[in-house]
Image (spheres, rainbow, N blue to C red):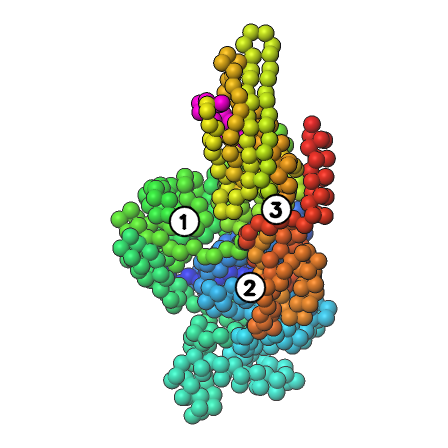
Amino acid sequence: MKEFSTASIRNIVLASHSNSGKTMLLENILNFTGATTRIGKIEDGTTTSDWDEEEQKRQISLFSSLIPIVYKDLKFNFIDTPGYSDFVGEVVSAMRVADAALILVDSVAGAEVGTEVALQYAEKFEIPRFLILNKMDRDNASFAKALKSVEEITDARLIPMQLPIGEKADFKGVVDLLTMKAYLGDGKTASEIPAEMQDEVEEARMILVEAAAEGEDALLEKYFENGDLTTEEMIQGLHKAIQVSNIIPVMAAAGGRMMAIAPIMEALVALAPSPLERPAVKANTPKGEIELHYDDKGPLAAYVWKTTADPFVGRQTFFKVYSGVMSSDTRVWNATKGEEERLAGVQVPSGKDMNAVSVLHAGDLGAVAKLSVTTTGDTLTTKEQNITLPMPEYPTPLYRVAITPRTQADASKMSQTLSRLAEEDLTLKWEMEAATRQTLLFGMGDQHIDVAVKRAEQKFQLFLDLHEPKVPYEEHITKESSATYRHKKQTGGSGQFGEVALKVFPLEDEDFSFSNDVFGGAISSNYMASIEKGIRNVMKEGVVAGFPVHNVGVSVYDGKEHPVDSKPVAFEIAGREAFKLAVKDANPVLYEPIMRVSVTVPEPNMGDVMGDLNTRRGRVEGMDTDRGRSTINAMVPLAEMMRYTTTLRSMTGGRGQFTMEFGHYEMVPHMQAQEIIAQRQREMQSED
């Protein structure tokens, strides 16, 4: 692929609800521009952007895919993103490096949860938005209804730039309000506007002219004087307006059937901003914050927005050049990791294919293979400049499962593989839960977890089994208690002897304290470390139900030792058993983690969600309503939130969102505690 200057580059992210037609629109654009000779099909697994084996199997996009398309000497870097909400991390990464967003809406279904997410993130990243009401050829398609449904979920002004000629089976093409021409079929040739649409077109054009006039003061003055603008002036005004105001141009298409493709591409040629027109990017250096402009002569700064790991190809690193130029066979400095990397060959990806280039200019997107330490969110620069670009905030993964390796071979590579998957996908994380002794995998939902596990199998031959995660309960005591235990073992020769008398008592602000309060030398101080070791081991394993013991103080006040048979191991055992007896007599109770939960839902769902939280032993602490959405803040036991992601989606049609973080530990009510202890004891017996 030839080189493209910054002014000739357009970085556009395609975002929508799942099944709105992004992938097939791209297929048709590729064919329309001559990049491909045939149009791939999702059901055949032959599309350019859905090339991963798992995507072809499920017939939905799971990962973002970069597709460069050259049209009228401009290079359009289209990023096709997944529409399913479990894979929102891919959307965030793509929005981070895009300069405009093309948001598709199914004109039959209207605005859906994915539409709302796409609009919200585009607004958050402050990138211009274009709306395509797609699938206008389908039964029950309605331009007006679909447009109204989007207007209800955004504060932006939706201004039609095209009107459909017919709908459903009668959809023939579009009228472009800028050129005032009709474009039938793929839209390559212009024709006259149908007579029956003249009034509707004139009315819609006046609204578009007004929106264009708002882009520049000079145009606004001219509009007030003459009551109209030329086509060139409208393009000039709209080009500016969509970048500085909340105007979203609206187009119509049947992207899967090559209808209205040319008007879409012409609109993007005229209105999509190049990187040169985007605001300067703030970056950090050891000397303080700087502003980076898209300039080949500026200091090198490239942001890594995506990485993929493949055991055969190696790691592929996708980046955007924010300043300077990225050349093949050079050394760069990873400012995030503080290490040098060598770029063997810079490439331009197109789906799964890679095309080698010698240089990428500021504003362009590219990839490089086999970097050693670089992961998503890193900045590549020079050691002298040491620039770091900010990483966007990703949603916190809250859906959890417990995982175990299937074989010993899997166990040896589990940690490394999970870390690599989490480096690729910043909405995926894993951790060891000490209290339950489980390895937990966190994702955005069951589909997300399922894809991650399948990816581990296919890419790294790591086989995992999934289990229900356990709640990390804690065992506490509520009163003081004492106990004595003598360990005596005689097997011929020297035996084992140790006797320990100790007292346990609850602590408020300390997790554990241990004191030697023996007077008169009944136990040598040399054995205290062994006694404490035995107690700490029991605290990890638990006494009542196998959960760790917390907030307990221990005082060893008496005991006995034997001049020959006493050994550290004997006192370790005696200390352990005495501690168990004392805890059982100290009115032990279970404590559970209480989470600070914030649930945001459409206002009509608020009553149902609050009722559901009450059944989950939640305590609502406050509510707030803004722009038709209600936020409920509550404290809810973690045990009741394990599958809340799925429940909330079901209750709100996917439009509900929630955040959750640890608050504190509280005592489990007696009835629930009895059930937990009984269940845990059954599990421990079956393990034995």
**N-term mark: 1 or 3:** 1
Is disc 3 placed on a helix, strand or loop? Answer: strand
**N-term mark: 3 or 2:** 2
Principal secondary structure, stretch drawn in magenta: helix
**What residue is shown at x 43% (from left), y 67% (from top)?**
273
Whole-number angstrom distance, CA of label 1 to CA of label 2: 24 Å
| Residue found at the very far top of the displayed protein | 493
Residue with the mark numbered 3: 591
Amino acid type, mark 3: Tyr
Q: Residues within 10 Å of mark 3 (few under 14, many from 20)?
A: many
Residue 378 has which mark? 1
Where in the figure is residue 303, as x and y percent of width and height? 40, 53
Amino acid type, mark 2: Ala
Is disc 2 placed on a helix, strand or loop? Answer: helix
Amino acid type, mark 1: Asp
352 left or right, relative to 194: left
Which segment is the magenta one?
522-535
Is residue 529 magenta-colored?
A: yes
CB atoms at circles 3 and 2 under 8 Å apart? no
User: Looking at the image, which is closer to me, 586 or 660?
Assistant: 586
